[in-house]
Amino acid sequence: MTSARELVVEADGGSRGNPGPAGYGAVVLDAATGETLAEAAEYIGVATNNVAEYKGLVAGLKAARELFPDATVHVRMDSKLVVEQMSGRWKIKHPDMKPLAAEAGRVFPAGRVRYEWIPRERNKHADRLANEAMDAGRLGRRWEPSGSTASLDASAARNAAAPPPSGPPGDARAGAARARAALSGTAGTPSTGTSAGIAGTPTAGASGAPTAGTSARTSGSPAARTSDARTDTGAGARPATDDGPNDGPNDGLFAAEDVTATSSTPIASGDFEAEAGALAPTGHAARTTGATRADAPASTPVQPQGTAPQGWAGPDMGAPATFVLLRHGETALTPEKRFSGSGGSDPELSAAGLRQAEAVAAALAARGTIQEIVSSPLTRCRQTAAAVAARLGLDVRIEQGLRETDFGAWEGLTFGEVRERYSEDLDAWLASPKAAPTGGGESFATVARRVAATRDRLTAAHAGRTVLLVTHVTPIKTLVRLALGAPPESLFRMELSAASISAVAYYADGNASVRLLNDTSHLR
């Protein structure tokens, strides 16, 4: 007779097209040891993401019951919809999902199963199984457990040792400290009596200012490390639309000048853009050219006491890792100004969005500077990335950390509808980066930690290269905010249009240079 024990079921499902070729994956783990006890995966033909996720849940629960029928089960999934519906907090309306939810509910008594939402990066084992099943189905084969590497990959990811932290690349405060150390002739020790200011270190393009990255440290590429992304609370600025006209040069894009493109057209208050997250008022220039430390003139370096004049000279940090940040093209939700994150319907590009993707692809092909392409897993980004990749002859790598914020119950709603239904939650969200949307969505603080960790991995992997990151409003604004050392409320003061280009360079000493923001010249 089997003994009662606690099991963990992690499940996922995916559809390449939504609906499209679909598959699921599920893993049963021992709750005490984390040991993998069983795996299940299957290609299910053409289906939606949500149907595949439910089928993964059913398969995981049945695999757990076969092992220990009397077990208590902790289900962990990155599908907010499935977790909320199976927990009884959200209604199940779709006819394809009702029988699947009922089937899942019959596997174990309700009192022995509890559900938890987890971020996608914590559900990699099941995600890999689902993708293995879809890959097998594409080749006309069945998924075979003997050929799976999902367990090994998940174990390696959990056990990967992080190098000793020395300040994340692109962190303005850490970079400023190293710059001050270089100016004082010391290695790694900031000089006294100085202040980082809002942008940390002088950026290229200022009169007499250095290219970001001058310091005594000469190591090649920054190591991947855990970020200490700031989550301090700031007053929520009033959001407004980010769909105003843009003007901005793009000569010298991705070169060593700071060039910005911002809107100069004010808008009426109450006109909101919520599609992809960080709501941004127009009319706020974010130009960083010539930014210097708050306690020093723009053209005069700080001279530490007892040292000889050194000017701006410093060791050559080599070519930076340059991230060209491309926001995806429009979807049907964009002109309607609806919240569209990673917890909703995963819409495709609209006809206008497809035209925008082709236009930005042509512009990037004409420049010829992109060496690699990394995309958010969401459909609108993958389609935009595919248009660029086709022009450049490059492959697209998917990075889960680049996905948009999960807006919980706000997904698909306009700002006005959220204000009407969840006014207190909205006020809290606007006032604090630690506040999450209604229904268990992600706070900006959570997104900042995820994006900063992704930034660290990518800068370590792509030192000296120019990489196109196809992503969303919140991740792009977060990267810019962290590079500038700006407070969280700055997310509400940047404009970022559909299919716009921004750029940040990351140097080996931890400094970052914001080179471009919201360039849409290729769309005119």
Image (spheres, rainbow, N blue to C red):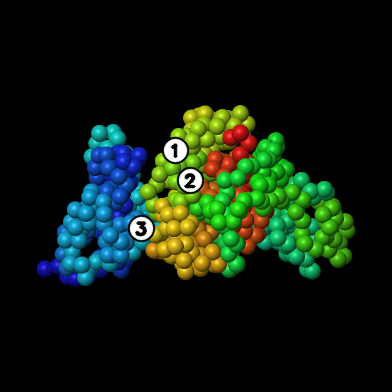
Label disc, if present, on residue 350 of the rendered structure: 1
Label disc, if present, on residue 334 of the rendered structure: 2
Number of other residues with Cα within 10 Å of mark 1, as a class: few under 14, some 14 to 19, many 20 or more:
some
Instruction: For the C terminus, give its image quadrant.
Output: top right
Q: Secondary structure at mark 1?
A: loop
Q: Nearer the viewer, residue 256 or 234?
A: 234
Q: Secondary structure at mark 3?
A: helix
Q: Position of residue 453 (x, y in %)?
A: 52, 56
Number of other residues with Cα within 10 Å of mark 3, as a class: few under 14, some 14 to 19, many 20 or more:
many
Could you tell which of marks 3 and 1 lies nearer the N-terminus?
3
Q: Position of residue 264 (x, y in %)?
A: 68, 47
Label disc, if present, on residue 80 of the rendered structure: 3
Q: Nearer the viewer, residue 104 or 27?
A: 104
Label disc, if present, on residue 481 of the rendered structure: none
Q: Residue at x 52, y 51 (%)?
A: 273
Q: Are marks 3 and 2 in contact (CB under 8 Å)?
A: no
In the image, residue 3 sits, relative to residue 280, either above or below, namely below
Tag 2: amino acid: Thr
In the image, residue 148 sits, relative to residue 352, either above or below, namely below
Q: Secondary structure at mark 2?
A: loop
Tag 3: amino acid: Lys
Q: CA distance from mark 3 to mark 1?
A: 25 Å
Residue 463 visible in the current orientation: no
Q: CA distance from mark 1 to mark 2?
A: 9 Å
